[in-house]
Image: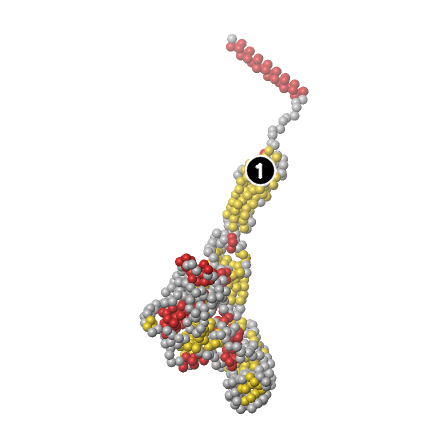
């Protein structure tokens, strides 16, 4: 890159986002610097990864600048600030065309830094982007020191995709912007080449306080003051300048204070930021009105004010854009202490003038200019219909209240009329003059609060979706109109969670749980034991979050799994108790190794298993019993041998066996009772006769032979 008089000469641009790898190793050479160890942990970490400049995009919308866009509204945000983004979309960030000039909105985000909730937040953000299509997200952790990564990431993105966009608004997600005033200023601007305007800081010094989050050590920036820069809360910039700043940013090291980094880029380009009195990044100090909202009359002529909470932003936007009537005064005030009087120059005092019965504590003096007035209070107010929500949702079969109120509350109403735009013409819903009259199509299912003007609709159908207009006529003849948009949705009827057909939850086998939803569903959220379920090595989700799969299922995966299905109008939750089957494992037999004959004993077989096993006993290979406990009431030699217990799980269809040898002791041969005398005599006689017969036979044999 080369610059001549602050202008970029050569700026070759890539044709698409070309960063695909988020891996960026630490710069270990920093550790050897003598001053490194003395810095705080955050600064040390920043310096180790300072060279990591561009990251892959998780969410991208290159089509945003595909049309003839006049103004691109770019807002820095973080994942958890959904309410702020929602408020901006409803107010000053609306994508629309004003006086032929198209406005588009983008939010710049990194990734969430909260470990357990990170995956859950990311899923919600991706759903949000599918609905609104206005989020640019890079794969770096959102933190204070990484804000500059959003700056350089956006400058590169803009230079790739938005080269023809003439103007950019860039700001935080807690500011009020008067879009009409911004457009009027830009239309009057004659030079986009060097345009950058906002709340300019010219003598902002780097903080040397180690306890401050803005702390910058001298080794990072040694000058007394930062270069002039615009407050990052909000500023306007020309598109051509943004492209040149992209080139300049590449010539500089990343700096942790993003506002100051912009000033450094401007110094490279020799461009000075311009002050705009209507951009208040430090806020404005004014007293609140009675309802707690700052006076809209002070906001109406400004471009930007920092900072407002989401509900304050919506209220302020509605008040500024209503039929607001404000005095136009130019006050030149000098306090005369002895008389406690104020000198006030009043211009255009015909709107609020002394003596008006509607005014409170107004000064009693003539309207001559200048005038010496007694100290009093001036009040600016508008008679109008207040609408807490301009867009309301309902559920088929349910009811909804379209809430309105009139300011000031004491306004007397002569008539109230509600109508519905069906697309084919206006339909009377309900009205009030002398009495309440219900429209023909709404008999019995509408009610009107004549005190506030609010409308209740019951027994909603899909055909009730559309625009509802209220007209209130005051007794002074003033007509106060307002409009509310109602969208009726079908509710989620039922949700169930169960394994896919034919699958059993078995450890070390694959399992998929399905979240079945009856009714329209926009998004599903999974929890385990009441905490967000996050992906792990073995746990994955389908793209639409309808299933969670375990590849494979582990014993640690057991628990209560909840699936909550959401649509814009309702949500329902179902639970499933996951108890993985496993085993049998580590089968054992408890009992003695030896037993005395005639004694009793008990052998117990056990194995770790879900569900519980069945047990079969074998003795020396023959089945002898079924059950976990084998009891022998009187042991004998027949009970001696090898006992085998076989444990079997009917779900996993697995078995485990264990063998135990049992010895029966004290077993012997029984002796006969003593012989009586007769038995002994019989034995002797039989023995003598037997011997005589043997001798006689022998003599006969010898005689015959001789």
- Answer above or below: position of 697 versus 330: above
Residue farthest to the right, as pictured: 677
From the viewer's side, name the closer residue of 294 and 99.
294
- The residue located at (59%, 14%) in the rendering is 692
Is residue 383 depicted above or below 212 in this figure?
below
Residue 29 placed where, x, y %? 40, 58
Q: Residues within 10 Å of mark 1 (few under 14, many from 20)?
A: few
Q: How many marks?
A: 1
> Which residue is labeled 1 in the image?
593
Is residue 78 in sight in this rendering? Answer: yes
Instruction: Give the image location of residue 634, x and y in percent.
Output: 62, 37
- Image position, residue 32 (x, y; %): 41, 57
Q: Residue at x 54, y 65 (%)?
A: 572
User: Closest to the observer: 274 or 680?
Assistant: 274
Question: Which image quarter: residue 265?
Answer: bottom left
Front residue of 48 and 480: 48
Along the viewing direction, whichever of 491 and 281 lies nearer the viewer: 281
Q: Residue at x 66, y 23 (%)?
A: 674
The image quarter containing residue 382 is bottom right
Secondary structure under tag 1 reads: loop
Q: Is residue 646 above or below residue 114?
A: above
Residue in the image at 53% along x and 73% along y: 394
- Looking at the image, residue 32 lies above or below residue 264: above
Q: Quadrant of the N terminus?
A: bottom left
Residue 315 position in % (x across, y down): 53, 77
Residue 463 visible within the image? no
């Amino acid at each position: 890159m080369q610059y001549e008089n602050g202008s970029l000469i050569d700026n070759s641009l890539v044709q698409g986002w070309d960063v695909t790898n988020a891996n960026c190793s630490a710069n270990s050479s920093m550790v050897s610097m003598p001053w490194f160890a003395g810095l705080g942990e955050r600064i040390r970490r920043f310096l180790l990864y300072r060279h990591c400049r561009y990251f892959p995009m998780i969410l991208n919308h290159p089509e945003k600048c595909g049309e003839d866009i006049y103004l691109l509204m770019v807002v820095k945000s973080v994942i958890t600030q959904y309410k702020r983004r929602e408020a901006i979309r409803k107010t000053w960030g609306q994508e629309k065309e004003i006086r032929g000039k198209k406005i588009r909105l983008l939010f710049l985000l990194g990734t969430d830094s909260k470990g357990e909730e990170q995956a859950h937040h990311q899923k919600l953000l991706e759903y949000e982007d599918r609905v609104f299509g206005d989020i640019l997200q890079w794969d770096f952790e959102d933190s204070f020191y990484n804000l500059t990564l959003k700056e350089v990431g956006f400058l590169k993105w803009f230079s790739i995709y938005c080269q023809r966009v003439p103007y950019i608004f860039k700001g935080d997600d807690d500011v009020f912007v008067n879009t009409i005033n911004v457009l009027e200023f830009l239309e009057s601007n004659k030079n986009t080449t060097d345009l950058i305007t906002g709340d300019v800081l010219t003598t902002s010094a780097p903080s040397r306080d180690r306890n401050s989050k803005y702390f910058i050590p001298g080794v990072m920036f040694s000058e007394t003051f930062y270069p002039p820069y615009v407050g990052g809360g909000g500023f306007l910039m020309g598109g051509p300048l943004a492209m040149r700043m992209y080139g300049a940013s590449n010539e500089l090291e990343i700096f942790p204070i993003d506002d100051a980094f912009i000033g450094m880029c401007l110094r490279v380009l020799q461009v000075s930021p311009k002050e705009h009195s209507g951009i208040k990044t430090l806020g404005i100090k004014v007293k609140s009105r009675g309802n707690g909202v700052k006076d809209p009359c002070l906001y109406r002529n400004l471009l930007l004010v920092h900072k407002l909470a989401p509900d304050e932003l919506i209220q302020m936007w509605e008040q500024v854009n209503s039929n607001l009537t404000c005095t136009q005064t130019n006050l030149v005030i000098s306090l005369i202490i002895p008389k406690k009087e104020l000198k006030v120059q009043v211009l255009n005092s015909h709107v609020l003038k002394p003596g008006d019965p509607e005014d409170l504590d107004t000064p009693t003096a003539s309207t001559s200019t200048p005038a010496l007035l007694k100290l009093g209070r001036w009040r600016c107010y508008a008679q109008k219909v207040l609408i807490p929500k301009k867009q309301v949702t309902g559920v088929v079969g349910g009811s909804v209240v379209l809430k309105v109120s009139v300011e000031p509350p004491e306004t007397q109403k002569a008539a109230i009329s509600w109508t519905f735009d069906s697309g084919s013409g206006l339909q009377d819903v309900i009205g009030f003059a002398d009495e309440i009259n219900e429209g023909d199509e709404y008999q019995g299912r509408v009610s009107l609060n004549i005190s506030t003007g609010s409308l209740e609709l019951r027994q909603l159908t899909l055909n009730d979706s559309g625009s509802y207009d209220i007209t209130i006529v005051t007794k002074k003849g003033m007509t106060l109109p307002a409009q509310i948009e109602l969208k009726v949705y079908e509710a989620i009827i039922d949700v169930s969670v169960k394994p896919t057909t034919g699958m059993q939850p078995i450890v070390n086998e694959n399992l998929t749980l399905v979240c079945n939803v009856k009714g329209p569903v926009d998004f599903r959220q999974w929890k385990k034991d009441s905490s967000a379920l996050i992906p792990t090595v073995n746990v994955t989700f389908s793209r639409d979050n309808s299933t969670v799969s375990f590849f494979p299922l582990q014993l640690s995966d057991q628990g209560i799994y909840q699936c909550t299905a959401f649509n814009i109008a309702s949500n329902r939750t179902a639970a499933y108790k996951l108890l993985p089957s496993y085993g049998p494992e580590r089968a054992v037999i408890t009992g003695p190794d030896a037993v005395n004959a005639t004694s009793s004993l008990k052998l117990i077989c056990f194995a770790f298993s879900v569900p519980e096993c069945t047990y079969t006993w074998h003795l020396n290979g023959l089945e002898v019993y079924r059950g976990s406990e084998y009891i022998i009431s009187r042991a004998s030699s027949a009970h001696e041998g090898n006992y085998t217990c076989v444990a079997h799980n009917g779900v996993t269809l697995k078995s485990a066996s264990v063998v135990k040898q049992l010895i029966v002791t004290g077993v012997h041969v029984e002796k006969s009772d003593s012989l009586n005398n007769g038995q002994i005599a019989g034995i002797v006689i039989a023995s003598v006769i037997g011997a005589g017969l043997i001798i006689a036979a022998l003599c006969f044999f010898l005689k015959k032979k001789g």
